[in-house]
Amino acid sequence: MNRDRIIYFVVLLSVFAACFAVYQFYFKAKLEKYAQDKQLLENLNSTYSSLSGAFRGEDPDTVIAQYRSVVQSWRDAIDARVGYFNDAEWRDYQNPPEDVFILQYWYGERTREMTAALWEKAQGKYGAEVYQRFPADIQGMLGVPYAEQWQGYDIQRSHVTSNLERLSYGISVLDLLLDSNAQAIRQVAMYDPQPSRTIGADVVYHRLGVSFVIEVKDFVGMIEKFRAADRYFNIEGMKVTHPYIAVRYEPRLEVEMFIVRTKPKESFLAGTVAAGGPASNVQQAFSAFSAGGGAPLQNPFRLQGDDDEEYVREPEPTGVARAWRWFKRTVLFTN
């Protein structure tokens, strides 16, 4: 009896093992392949439906060629315009050599060279009155640490390059004021970058607070220089006073103002711009058509207001509405 049961269980286990082996080594792979083919069929059907609605019976190669030419023109326009909003000429600095043994000492020597060159320029302009007309502690005013403040810290190349860039930026502002013939420079304050809400999602604002003394004609010339510059300059706010109205020499104005410059984001310059920016609209739309999607291209140069809302031009009225508009403007002199 026990022998029969053992034989029965052995045969039963052999049948289960054979069924499991057939499923594991044959049907499982077939079922996975079937699931993949089914998903591929659904994707092809979806793509076919999108293409049918997008091309509407036209030759796909012709439509894609048309969109490719439009995308290229937009990209060329972006490349031509991005230089205007780039303040890279104020960020030029020397990168630390690869064989520098102690970055802290190299950083200290480099900052001293940069500030010494600026001081020589200021001394040539103001002479013996340089200490009364020009800031004495340039690095402290700009928020750039001295090498001695890094004693005991593990200094990385990123610390050195970021502070050299900040120092170069501040020195460029002081150079601008010196070249504009400022009679005295009181203060230069540098603020953290802020996202631009009016130019585009891929541009950031750099705001600079400056306080200086300048004659009227030179001040007008500086503003005109901003207006005619081939890079973006903007005066965000300004306070001008003239406390010494009884003097006989050329009026010297006490000026406090915010100067704004812009810089494209690193992701934009690298070609992978932030989502929602002009170039990303182009890339997403073209990628959709290249991959078989049916999404229409959107204008990448949309205007953005203070709340990042798109301004849409209202359609021209027709018929009675157009006649009523003509009557209001021509007869009633209203809008």
Image: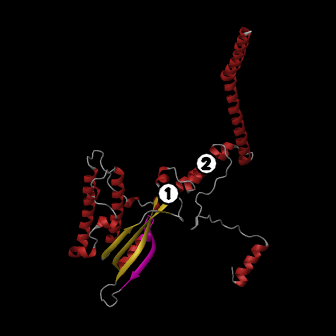
| Residue 285 spot, x, y in % from top left | 62, 50
At horizontal 59% and vertical 52% (from top left) the residue drawn is 282
Asked if the residue under mark 2 is in contact with the one under mark 1, i.e. CB atoms within 8 Å, the reply is no
Residue at which label 2 appears? 286
Query: Outermost residue, right direction?
Result: 320
Residue 73 higher or lower than 211, as above or below? above
Q: Tell me the residue at 49%/57% (across/down).
A: 80
Q: Position of residue 276 (x, y in %)?
A: 58, 56
Q: Give 324 or 215, whichever is nearer the viewer.
A: 215
Residue toward you, 148 or 116: 148
Q: Of the residues shown, which amino acid type is indicated by label 2?
A: Phe
Say left or right for 61 vs 148.
Answer: right
User: For this view, does 232 lie left or right of residue 17?
Assistant: left
What stretch of residues is rendered in magenta?
Answer: 226-242
User: What's the residue at 32%, 84% (across, down)?
Assistant: 250
| Residue 17: % across, % down | 68, 18
Quarter that holds the N terminus: top right
* Snapshot quadrant of residue 207: bottom left
Q: Which residue is mark 1?
A: 80
SS of the residue under disc 1? helix
Up the image or down, 231 lies above or below 75; here it is: below
